[in-house]
Image (cartoon, grey):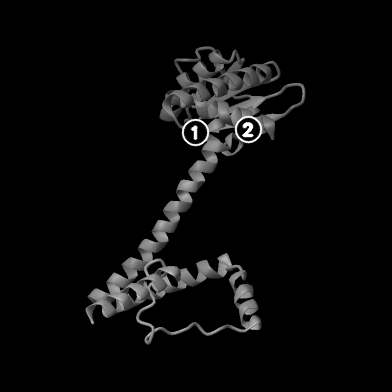
Amino acid sequence: MIRFSLFLWFFAFISFKTQAGFFDRKAEGWHWYETKKEERKPEEKKKDQKMAFIPINPTKWVEEQQKQLKESLNLALFNPNFENVKNYQILQKKMMDRSENFSEMWQKVIFSTPSLDENMTFPITQVGRHAYLEIQQKKKNELIKKISKSYGLFFFFKGDCAYCHVFAPIVKQFAQKHKLEIMAISLDGGKIAEFPNTIRNNGAAQKLDIKTVPALIAVNPLTQKILPISYGVNSIEDLENRLLLLEEK
């Protein structure tokens, strides 16, 4: 009896090994519990494939996410219980994660595409920025040097004007730096230390419509072109930028 049982066991084992191994296949459960997959119709398969290739509309997706985020925030503000606040934080984190991924990819594109890197034009590092400013200042000086051959400066002031006395040394330094001829004109007959050889107003202020002081005007005597560089106190850098901008226009 025992031999007969062993024989049956051995026969079953051999038969089992000649077929696809039970352990080599995916888990199926016992055969009386196993359910066979229902064969799908060809038209259903085609429909599924077609649906799989329908692209997501990015604009609608973003709008929907923003809508959900806003509604979740409003709900959390209206009823700030644990679940409402938690749900809002989850949605917000998802959007922040996507924004972070976008930002990282943005940097990768910039680093690998020099033509898109603003740092190539306007450096942000200390060394690069210093070099950029030196180059820009050199260009300014060259342009103003050309302008100085055609323009002269009129500095209008009053002796009792405190701002005029503050602005006078700046104007003098600006004129000396760029070798611009300058004439100081006093509207009230007063004096100013930086320009001892001042002249009294002889109608120039009225002709140039000068109503406030201090005023610095550039005039081209040949073309009669007038550039109102400054009304009030400004730095040398501001005067340079304004002169270049006005001449460019």
Q: Along the line of sight, which residue is nearer the eye, 194 or 239? A: 239
Residue that carries the numbered disc 1 in the rendered image: 232
- How far apart are labels 2 and 1 at the CA level? 18 Å
Question: Where is residue 221 shown, x and y percent of the image?
Answer: 73, 21
Q: Amino acid at mark 2?
A: Leu
Secondary structure found at label 1 = loop
In the displayed image of the protein, which residue is found farthest to the bottom?
A: 32
Residue that carries the numbered disc 2 in the rendered image: 245
Q: Residue at x 36, y 62 (%)?
A: 93
Q: Label 2: few (<14), some or many (≥20) within 10 Å?
A: few
* Side (left or right) of 80 relative to 242: left
Q: Amino acid at mark 1?
A: Gly
Q: Residue at x 69, y 35 (%)?
A: 249
* Side (left or right) of 108 relative to 57: left
Above-or-below relation of 82 to 95: below
* Side (left or right) of 113 relative to 70: right
